[in-house]
Amino acid sequence: MEIKKREVLFMKHMKISTLAVLGLVLICSLGISGCLSSDSQKGMVGEVGMVPFTSEKQMQEFFSGKYSGDSYYGGRYTSMNTAAVMDAGGATPVGGAQNTTPAPMPAPEAAVSMDSKSSGMYYDSDVSSVDRVSGTNVQVMGVDEADLVKTDGNFIYYTPQLHYPTNLTLVNSTYGSYYNYETFQTTFTIDALPPETAAIISNIAGSGENLYLINDTLIVITYNTTTAYNISDPANPVKLWSENLDGFYKDSRMIDGKLYMVVQKYDVGSEGPIVYMDAKLDYASCYYPVGPGIIRPSMDSTYFVSEVDIGNGNFDKTIAMVGSYNSILYASGDNLYLTNYFYPDTTAIELQFIQEHGSEYYPPETMNQINRVMGTEYLSESIKYNAVMEAVYNYTKTLTSEEQENYYNDYRKAYSAYLMEIVKDKETTTITRINLDTFDVTTGTVPGNINDQFSIDEYDGYLRVATTVGGNWMTRDEQTNGVYVLDKDMKTVGQVTGLAEGEQVYSARYVGDRLYLVTYKQIDPFFVIDLSDPENPAVLGELKLPGYSTYLHPVGENLVVGLGYSDDWKMKLTLFDVTNVSSPTELDSYVFSNYSSSSALYDHHAFMWDADRNLLVLPTYEHAYVMQIKEGDITMVKDDVHKNATVVRSIYINNYLYTFSDQEVHILNQDTWELVKKISIPQPQYPEDMYRPYPMPYY
């Protein structure tokens, strides 16, 4: 009722009357153009999917808006801080702020190679020379992900959430004084061993938070640049190459020494071919979404997917795909996948509902007005909708209060049911697969919307995807969930649907031929789903608990830990036992006090699991909580506090835990939990009379 009241009452403020619109119909029929269009307003048609352009003309028309119909392509540009200009060695920004970074220290003595690696599950790190070391917490073993901390066990490379000023200029004007300035971030190199003498030995100013470390090369990615450094002498990093990204960094992966970049660009231009990184892209290498007009693809930007040679910075292969800000990247060892959500066009659906069922609610004279508007080919959908809603509003003004109440209730109930049936049938996400060897493209579709990258997994030649159908705010009470299995041709061969009606997917984790899935509305159903037969996936068991988990992580055979919230919104760890798949159980839980939160709730890179010691580390405001999961119990063994600073990451090297904030790096002995060393992070220096900008904190 409230939904329709808002829609109908909005018409009180409409400036276009039904009579004016009908007059506009007559003008258009006489051939006058301008406010109306023909082909550009018909919407896209055809099967749902991603297809290549067939000509440069078609591609130009698409990006100029002449082809995409009512679907909007384009987005608002958001400016970001400009990184400082770097000198050849990359050690100091040109133009000042040199007192904000430490002076280089002598290079450390070479460490003895031990050729061993960490045994931590789902961690990937190219290390040797130490007994054990953690890497970045990644989704797929062997597929590295960029993060703000990287280590080889001997040296740590860390980019804190600090912005250092450069080119500070005091400007005096008639309106007062203010500072013009630019800011940059810095990556610090820490000599990690031995822990007692660990220290910062060098820095790379103008850096970013997205780091990769492979052999003697450090890759640093900012929002618009990618730079490689030779760090064979960690105390003196040397810039190898740097490339300005032709757009904004979206995501990346490092696989077998090859860097795969996804760059987002809001405006590719409508004149001439698409040019990316100074190279012309063939129209057949550019893909766009197609589908029936009743659902619309999300289209606010274009993504460029490239293979980058880390030796010289060349972008060797590139394809372009139209997508949106919420497109999700998933990568296996062989393929990269990018999603695009097709959302229900509720305007078109409601107009269709009124045409089909309006006579049940409105008198003939009102329906005549509506049919005249809807039968006019040259009116845009938005003008039709406004005119129809005004006609509806004019009718409801003639009703008594009781009649209006009955109308609103009956209409909303019928329309919601109608909308949900269409959503179940039409709401779609396309998944575009890019073969990393050939860059060949194949597209498949699944019903509904995908929560995050962990809802997607490739295994034994099949792609498994968990989705929610009906997440629209008008259909949320009827939403449902499913799991779909696609074959090598990206065709659906198996599915299990109807899971947890009225709820939505909050977290998923695939382990071999099994899926652990959490949905939520008021309670947390934890599903165990068998995927061993791709054509016949099946629910093996479920467990209902209050609260929900936003991240799931395997912590041993038949054990999964969930990080999320309790039913009273306190952060919670839950230990699930799936030994009996038909009846999973909660072995233990730990609820944190004071309404704690953690960046690990939404960023898995902040979650650190030490499988050798059964230790889990969570950054939470000023704390690094060290939790032990052992013999079915969850206990806190250490609360490492960083005073007045937010902890963002943690790693282990040998038997020492390193925790990171913007103020300090702490090194703790994991046998005694004594603080062995505290390393101060140089802080930005701003004039006392200037407001100090600070980045969004990690929680």
Image: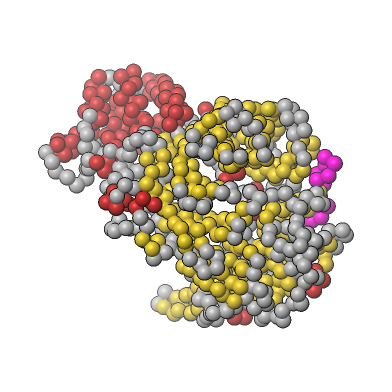
How many marks overall?
0
Q: Quadrant of residue 12?
A: top left
In-image side of 197 versus 521 (left or right): right
Residue 421 in picture, x, y percent from top left: 44, 25
* 64 to 505, vertically: above or below: below
Q: Residue at x 63, y 32 (%)?
A: 531
Q: Quadrant of residue 576?
A: top right
In-image side of 33 versus 343 (left or right): left
Residue at the right extreme?
A: 672
- From this viewpoint, is residue 244 visible? yes
* 652 to 558, vertically: above or below: below
Q: Residue at x 56, y 75 (%)?
A: 239
Please state which of residues 689 and 622 is positioned toward the viewer in this rendering. 622
- Please check the rendered image and state whether residue 135 is part of the magenta-colored stretch, yes or no: no
Residue 563 in picture, x, y percent from top left: 69, 44
- Residue stretch in magenta: 629-643
Quadrant in which the C terminus appears: bottom right
Dominant secondary structure (helix, strand or loop) of the stretch shown in magenta: strand
Please state which of residues 449 and 401 is positioned toward the viewer in this rendering. 449
* 78 to 234, vertically: above or below: above
Q: Residue at x 73, y 57 (%)?
A: 134
* 176 to 289, vertically: above or below: below
Residue at the front extreme?
A: 438
